[in-house]
Amino acid sequence: MASLFSSVSCSCTVVLCLVLFIFRGASAATFTLVNKCDYSVWPGILGSPKLETTGFELPKGSSRTFQVPTGWSGRFWGRTGCNFDDSGHGSCATADCGSSQVECNGNSATPPATLAEFTLGTGTQDFYDVSLVDGYNLPMVVDVNGGSGACASTGCVTDLNRKCPNELKVEGGGACRSACDAFGNPEYCCSGAYNTPSTCKPSTYSEMFKSACPKSYSYAYDDASSTFTCTGADYRVTFCPNLPSLKSARDSSPKATGTVPAAVQEAELASSWLASLATGDSTRSYPLSVVQFALVLVTSLILWYNIGL
């Protein structure tokens, strides 16, 4: 009888833990946008599904936090030199989205623009980067809070507008164009005969960007040293960070993000589930998967079998 009670108690505990884990539901990642510039920035947002806003004013020294659902893919950027009237109509000197409004309404940034790009996993890794492929208009850093994995900070803290070659400078010097935007040559744009990793190589201009900002994308196929991963994290995007260098709580070196065998991904995912359940390390949780459902079903059958004995 004691053995039966012990078996049933153990099975109930396992089922309860799994149910509590599963029915936390699919929650969002917390994103915080911070403006440390000496002027107002108007962040623009483009992604799917659409967030609560696609553009807003972020005054000097302020921040704004909002929720981004799992599975979201999109980008953030900072518009500068904006002038909007009381009805919200106007334009920006750099990274304007062409909507003639504070809200970008599904439009992306007009180059040159520094971009923070994200693809959030659904129980799997998030991918993120800071890109200078469309040029540069202001410093930007992505920092990570919580999560599991490498979870390194990335971005560009250098003022590239001061180092921008004359042939890439926009009028007024408020932004620095990419070579693709400035000249349109296929070898700079990784287009036409140059649209593969083997044919599109770094240019003198992209190498200048890379030297100044080693963790940022400098051209289209700069994946290995510029794409970062984390699982179940929250993120902070800072405009004009006053940091002397990028740093990470775990590992500041860039990580290559090539294809990972499915078995390894499953093992990492299972590990992250258990860690999240035990420690509550992240505010993120994930929707019910086939694997989770199977675990609950099998455990329930074991429980019922033990009771029947």
Image (spheres, rainbow, N blue to C red):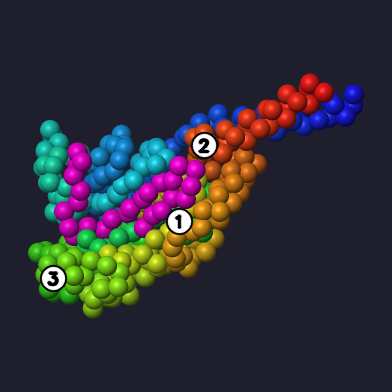
- In depth, the one of 226 and 296 nearer the eye is 296
Cα gap from disc 1 to disc 3, whole angstroms = 32 Å
Which residue is tagged 2? 289
Q: In which quarter of the view is residue 199 placed? A: bottom left
Label 1 sits on a secondary structure element that is strand
Which residue is tagged 3? 185
Q: State yes or no: residue 106 in magenta.
A: yes
Q: Report the residue at 44% width, 37% height from top.
A: 28
Q: Is residue 46 left or right of residue 265?
A: left
Q: Report the residue at 59% width, 34% height from top.
A: 294
Label 3 sits on a secondary structure element that is loop
Q: Are marks 1 and 3 in contact (CB under 8 Å)?
A: no
Cα gap from disc 2 to disc 1, whole angstroms = 21 Å
Q: Position of residue 256 (x, y in %)?
A: 44, 65
Q: Position of residue 70 (x, y in %)?
A: 42, 40
Residue 123, disc: none
Q: Amino acid at mark 1?
A: Thr
Q: Amino acid at mark 3?
A: Asn
Residue 229, disc: 1
In the rendered image, is residue 223 in sight?
yes
Cα gap from disc 3 to disc 2, whole angstroms = 46 Å
